[in-house]
Image (cartoon, helix red, strand yellow):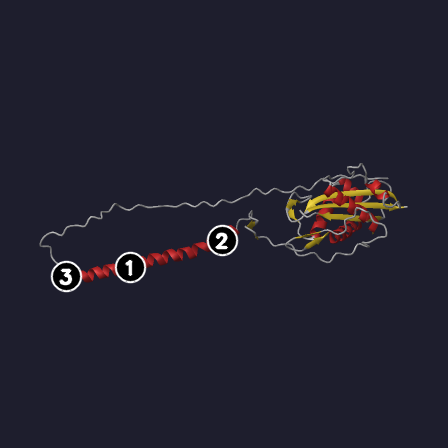
C-alpha cells in the first residue's frame, strides 16, 4: 500500500520595511552691512583710557557669553543623544539596526539522540550523504536534523499512546535521495519527474516493506519564514529548531498528522527513516518515509 501525502510549502515572509533619513538644513541671513569706512568729523574728541577700558570689558563680556553658549550647545548634544537611542529601543517593530540584532539569538542545539545506523548495507545510489549550512549560531548538519526529527516524531506518537518507530537506515537513504532530487530538479512532490512514487523508489533499492508511506516538507534556514500553526514568523538557525519546525508542519496538516499517528488505516508502521537535504542557498527539503516490514 502506498501513501501519497504532500506537505504545502512554508512561505518566506517578505520584509519590505526600510528607513529613510531626512536632513533639514536651516540658514539665516543677518541685516545688510556696509564695508565703506566712516569719516571722522572734524574736532572729534580723542578716546580716553576710560573708554578703552570699557571697550576691553565689553569684549571680555562678549567672549564669556559666547563661551557659555558653546558650552550649552555641547551639553545639549550630550543630553539629547541617549534620548534618541532610548526611543529607538522602545520601538517593538524594529528587529535590527543595520546588522545588529536587537533580539537574542537562540541557544545552540543540544546533543541529538542518535537515531540509528548511518551506513546500512543497502543504500540508495542517489543518497548525497550529509549536507550542512553555517548560521551565526552553529553549523546545521542534515544528520543532526534527522536525529532530532526522528526523536520528536516518536515523542508525538508516545503522547498519543503509540509505540516508537525503529530507525531504518535504508529507508532514510531512500528518503534522503528524494530530498536532494527535489532540490536539484526543482520540484516539490511525492511523484518525481520520471513518474516514480515513494514505493517505486524504495523497491528499486530493497523490497522488505509491504506498506509504505511518505511525508515531505520544504523550508529555509537563516531567513524569516512563516511559522506553521500560529501565523507568526520564525528564523531557523539551529538543527534542533529546524527539526521542530519540520515536525510542526506535518502535525499541523491533517493528512500528515494521520500518517505519523497511524490514523490512516487499520495497519500501522514499525520502521521509519528521515532524509534531509540542506542546499547551499539555505533551502531545506525533508522526506520522512514510513515502512511496515513483512
Among the 4 quarters of the image, the one containing residue 81: bottom left
Proximity of marks 2 and 3: CB atoms separated by less than 8 Å: no
For marks 1 and 2, give the one nearer the viewer: 1
Q: Is residue 270 left or right of residue 107?
A: right
Q: Earlier in the sequence, mark 3 or mark 1?
A: 3
| Residue hosting label 1 | 63
C-alpha distance separating marks 2 and 3: 57 Å
Write down the residue under mark 3.
48
User: How far is disc 3 from disc 1 in space, using C-alphas?
Assistant: 23 Å
| Residue that label 2 marks | 85
Side of 111 relative to 88 (left or right): right
Q: Are marks 1 and 2 in contact (CB under 8 Å)?
A: no
Mark with earlier residue (2, 3)? 3
Relative vertical location of residue 105 with respect to residue 26 in this rendering, above or below: below
Q: Secondary structure at mark 3?
A: loop
Q: Secondary structure at mark 2?
A: helix
Amino acid at each position: 500500500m502506498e501513501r501519497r501525502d504532500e506537505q504545502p510549502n512554508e512561505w518566506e515572509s517578505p520584509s519590505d520595511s526600510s528607513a529613510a533619513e531626512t536632513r533639514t538644513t536651516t540658514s539665516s541671513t543677518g541685516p545688510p552691512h556696509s564695508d565703506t569706512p566712516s569719516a571722522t568729523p572734524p574736532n572729534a574728541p580723542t578716546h580716553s583710557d576710560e573708554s578703552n577700558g570699557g571697550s576691553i570689558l565689553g569684549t571680555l563680556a562678549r567672549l564669556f557669553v559666547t563661551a557659555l553658549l558653546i558650552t550649552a550647545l555641547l551639553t545639549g548634544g550630550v543630553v539629547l543623544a541617549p534620548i534618541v537611542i532610548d526611543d529607538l529601543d522602545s520601538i517593538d517593530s524594529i528587529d535590527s539596526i543595520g546588522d545588529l540584532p536587537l533580539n537574542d539569538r537562540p541557544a545552540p542545539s543540544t546533543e541529538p539522540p542518535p537515531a540509528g545506523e548511518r551506513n546500512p548495507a543497502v543504500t540508495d545510489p542517489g543518497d548525497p550523504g550529509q549536507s550542512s549550512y553555517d548560521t551565526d549560531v552553529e553549523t546545521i548538519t542534515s544528520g543532526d536534523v534527522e536525529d532530532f526529527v526522528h526523536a520528536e516524531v516518536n515523542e508525538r506518537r508516545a503522547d498519543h499512546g503509540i509505540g516508537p518507530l525503529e530507525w531504518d537506515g535504508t529507508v532514510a537513504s531512500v528518503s534522503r535521495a528524494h530530498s536532494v532530487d527535489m532540490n536539484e530538479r526543482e520540484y516539490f512532490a511525492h511523484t518525481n519527474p520520471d513518474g516514480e512514487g515513494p514505493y517505486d523508489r524504495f523497491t528499486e533499492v530493497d523490497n522488505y516493506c509491504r506498506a509504505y508511506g511518505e511525508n515531505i516538507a520544504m523550508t529555509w534556514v537563516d531567513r524569516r519564514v512563516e511559522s506553521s500553526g500560529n501565523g507568526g514568523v520564525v528564523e531557523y538557525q539551529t538543527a534542533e529548531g529546524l527539526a521542530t519546525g519540520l515536525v510542526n508542519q506535518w502535525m499541523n496538516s491533517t493528512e500528515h498528522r494521520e500518517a505519523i499517528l497511524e490514523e490512516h488505516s487499520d495497519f500501522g508502521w514499525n520502521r521509519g527513516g528521515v532524509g534531509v537535504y540542506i542546499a547551499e542557498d539555505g533551502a531545506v527539503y525533508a522526506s520522512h518515509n514510513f515502512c511496515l516490514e513483512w
